[in-house]
Image (cartoon, helix red, strand yellow):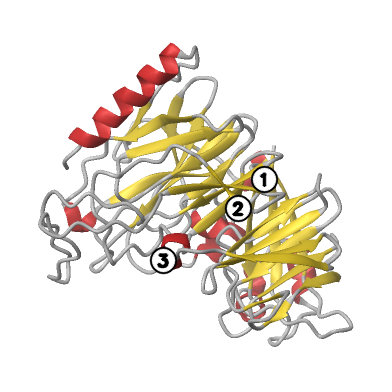
Amino acid sequence: MKQTKSLSLIIFIMLIGCRSGNQTAVDMLDANQDKDRIDLQIADIAEISYIPLKYGTENILVGTTSLTRNLFISHDKIFLGDIFYQSPKLISYDFIGEPIHVFGTYGRGPGEYINLTGFVVDTLADEVIIYDGLQSKFVVFSTTGVFKHEKLLEGGLKTNYSNIENINERYMLAYKDNSRVIGDEDIVLANGQLFISKTNPVIWGKVFTLYDKRTLEEVDFLDFEYEKPSRFQIFTIQNNLTTTKEGVYITSARTDTIYFMNRELKLVPRFIDVTKYKDINHEARLFPSAEGEKYLFFSTALENNFDNQNLRRFFAYDKKAKKLFRINTGMAEQGAVNTWESLINNDVVFGNPTLTLNHNYAATLLPPLFLLEHYDSLPADLKEIATQIREDDNPVLMLMKLR
């Protein structure tokens, strides 16, 4: 794998960090390492709660069984983004699963959206900002669901972000993985197609755009380019930002480096994936997925997974010892799997599907049919919920608060 440009960027950013007195160590991570294993179960590291999401008086149907960073937990509410394409919605719940507010409606008018690409909750400003990627606009509500204002973004594809993140009290970060492409060599996909060549580089705006949450105006901010072109088949790296206590990790299929941006907006390389993958069409990526007091959890994200040659592994990085451990789980490394089965069996399989907008939470939505079909293997408290559930009910939120 070609790493020249990526390593040059690392050295450059590290030099900047050294000069400013903010030098950060860069750790090497290898998904093939198998000597350091650890037995961890979810109950060892997290408080688990099961919350059946009720319909409420408005008969609110949650139409998706995937979270992908569309969950935020405040001190008294659960904000759930339902990304179902036919009826996207943002709903707030209390901690027993009763819906409190629905934010906006489907449509193209003021206070409406046709796509829920992402959202941030600003508890200090008492605001919720929804990003509609299809219409390239921000829609702002109070935390009680009252529409306040919206802003249409200019630039078309240049503002078609894949993620937004509440980076600190004043700013939010918009991120677009395939924005700036360096086409210095032909990349052949597993299906034989070319996405980009050295004679036809593509530039689609910025990787990072910083927005002032109060004005929703862009703020000048350092941007950078990735070493490799974007490719079509990236199945499980849909959300490249991972929230942590001190900032956000940024992962891309187009670089071996995991970057970290702190609350002061300093961007530094933090981890380098040195795994020797089979070839360019069977690469994975190690990416952070949740953070507790002791561990930062990683998993491999699969890419171009046409023949199940990729790795599916889960890791705990001991923050004090600065050491990566592979977690023993019952999940198969290759082939079809059911992540819900592993989670209810207490396996620590934190990855892209369990990402939230909180640093110390992992979560998933358990469909009623899955619960009924696996009734005998459910833990006692979840089995009690399943005895009262019907196939057409809303899913049950499995919430894991990391210690």
Q: Pointer 2: what residue?
A: 346
Alpha-carbon distance for marks 2 and 1?
7 Å
Q: Pointer 1: what residue?
A: 43
Query: Which element is circle 3 on?
Result: helix
Q: Amino acid at mark 2?
A: Asn
Query: Which element is circle 2 on?
Result: loop
Q: Residue at point 67% right, 45% down?
A: 43
Alpha-carbon distance for marks 3 and 1?
43 Å
Q: Residues within 10 Å of mark 2 (few under 14, many from 20)?
A: some
Q: Is residue 56 above or below residue 312?
A: below
Q: Residues within 10 Å of mark 1 (few under 14, many from 20)?
A: some
Quadrant containing the N terminus in the rendered view:
top left
Q: Pointer 3: what residue?
A: 157
Q: Amino acid at mark 3?
A: Leu
Nearest to N terminus: mark 3 or mark 1: 1
Nearest to N terminus: mark 2 or mark 1: 1
